[in-house]
Amino acid sequence: MSTASPASRALSAAPETTSPAMRGHLVLCTIALAVSFAEYWLLNYCAFPLFDSVYIWTREASAIAGGIALSAIAFVSYWRPHLFDSGRFFGASAAVMIAGSLLVAAGLALRQSALLVAGASLVTVGTGLANIVVGIGCIGLGMRRLGVAVTSAYVLAYASRGLFSLVPGEANLTLFCLLPLGSLALMAPAARPLFNQIFTEGSPAQAAVTAPKSFLPFGHQVFITLLIFRFIYGYTLTFGEVDRVPLLALGALAPLALVAVYVIASRRELSPDRLFQLSILCSVAGFLMLSIAHVQGSVTSMVLSCGTGFFEMLMYYVLIALGAKNTLNALPLLAWGNAMASWGTLLGANFGRFTNVQAADPSAVSAIASVVVFGIVAYVVLVQKTFSFTSTINGVAPLVPLVTAPVAATGDAEAGATSASTLEQRCAAIGAAHGLTDREQEIFEYLARGRNVRFIQEALVVSYNTVKTHVSHVYAKLDVHSHQELIDLVERTQ
């Protein structure tokens, strides 16, 4: 049976209370999120340009390794969460980061591409693992505090770009390797209880069969949107770069800071849909500058950076909020969301470099920008028009304890037999009225007794997919949407 997590209740609680402990948690989350945001900039601004002098394809290889690792973690944790626990996950994250850092140092010192690629790949994977820990550690902040933490953290991280530009590249590389370890150590105490809860409650794949509204499928619109708009982020990083170093568009800090100030001053929750609208407007405006006005350089980068900045805030806010609604699915959700972000960034970055090759021909740049603008607008008009991030978050039903009929006391055989007979009679009447097949009726009775998917699999000696198919048919025929609704239907039947 599934239980409502403390984080789920904390997220939906209103009004939110303020205590020294909660304020401390807010500060820690803001710092850790700022580190996560800064890591992406350090990776592209400092680490990759240094790697290029040894092996120019290091960034692509490490990005692919990161995407594959995060995708694998998402699927494995969805089906086999018992393979993870907090100590193992935290230890692996730290070990991967340390080993990767040492290999990177050796690769750069010895000018060995194999060592460098292996080290950069491990550091990229370790950074992704640390970001997952940060996300899970931020669960339980509450919706309003989460908005404050995410927007403030992004502004702090964006402002730090100016400081990084004043520091030697080798020092920035050291920061890039050490900062994820710092965020891991910072958030481990907050993340550990939820990690342990996730790994002891059972498989999300099993729970999703009887509570489909509590889980987002891997092909959900949220993840598709992450992929597409991280493509724009990757494009913004590389378009117009000089010596493969991204342009530093500090002018974007002002509008980003204004949004953060508004969120902090407002008593209302952050609206992810408003952030998405701001991201769309800035992204389209930036590409229109390229396609119509032929404006290149800092102005265009500033506008595009605003668009990607708003979407970065949106991405972290939505993923953490969704994880808080259903903590059992938090690990696969955060891993898959970060995987989609990695793949999108990789594709966008290479497309940006392709555009740079055409920079000598303004008409070619305009044509490419026009195609991107058309793609964004077409996606919003044709696909995104009925989609809402807010509705998606609110639509995820928290997992709640199943409330079943009282069981007869031990030793009262006659009462127990009567109770079982009554339950079977109710299930038989409901099944006959709704046209359940024999196998569906059998599974329906197990569900009515509060049995989970694993129990049904073992009792009937059938596969997970077979049980999943029959449960979906039972739900559809009975017009219920969760395990608890099915039990309530049986209880109401006389």
Image (cartoon, helix red, strand yellow):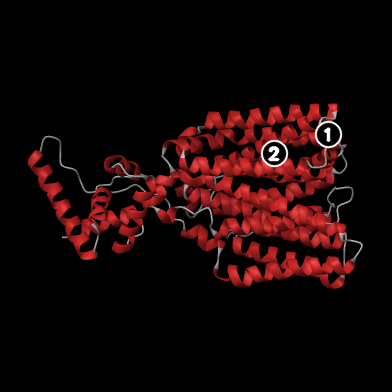
Q: Secondary structure at mark 1?
A: helix
The residue sitting at 81% across, 57% down in the picture is: 354
Closer to us: 478 or 274: 478
Q: Quadrant of the N terminus?
A: top left
Q: Position of residue 36 (x, y in %)?
A: 68, 43
Is residue 431 shown above or below 386? above
Q: Position of residue 52 (x, y in %)?
A: 84, 40
Quadrant containing the C terminus in the rendered view: bottom left
Q: Residue at x 38, y 44 (%)?
A: 3
Q: Secondary structure at mark 2?
A: helix
The residue that disc 1 covers is 171
Q: Residue furthest right?
A: 360
Which residue is farthest left? 414
Kindly identify the residue that appears in the image at 54 percent across and 29 percent down.
88
Q: Is residue 74 above or below residue 92?
A: below
Number of numbered discs visible in the structure rendering:
2
Tag 1: residue type? Ala
Q: Position of residue 164 (x, y in %)?
A: 83, 42
Q: CA distance from mark 2 to mark 1?
A: 18 Å
Residue type at the position of mark 2: Thr
Query: Which residue is the site of mark 2?
Result: 124
Q: Could you classify mark 1 by the number of other residues whose Cα lies within 10 Å: few (under 14), some (14-19), or many (20 or more)?
A: few
Given residues 148 and 325, the one toward you in this image is 325
Q: Give left or right: position of 400 versus 68.
A: left
In this rendering, position of residue 39 left or right of residue 268: right
Q: Quadrant of residue 411?
A: top left
**Residue 93 seen by the camera:** yes
Q: Nearer the viewer, residue 171 or 140?
A: 171
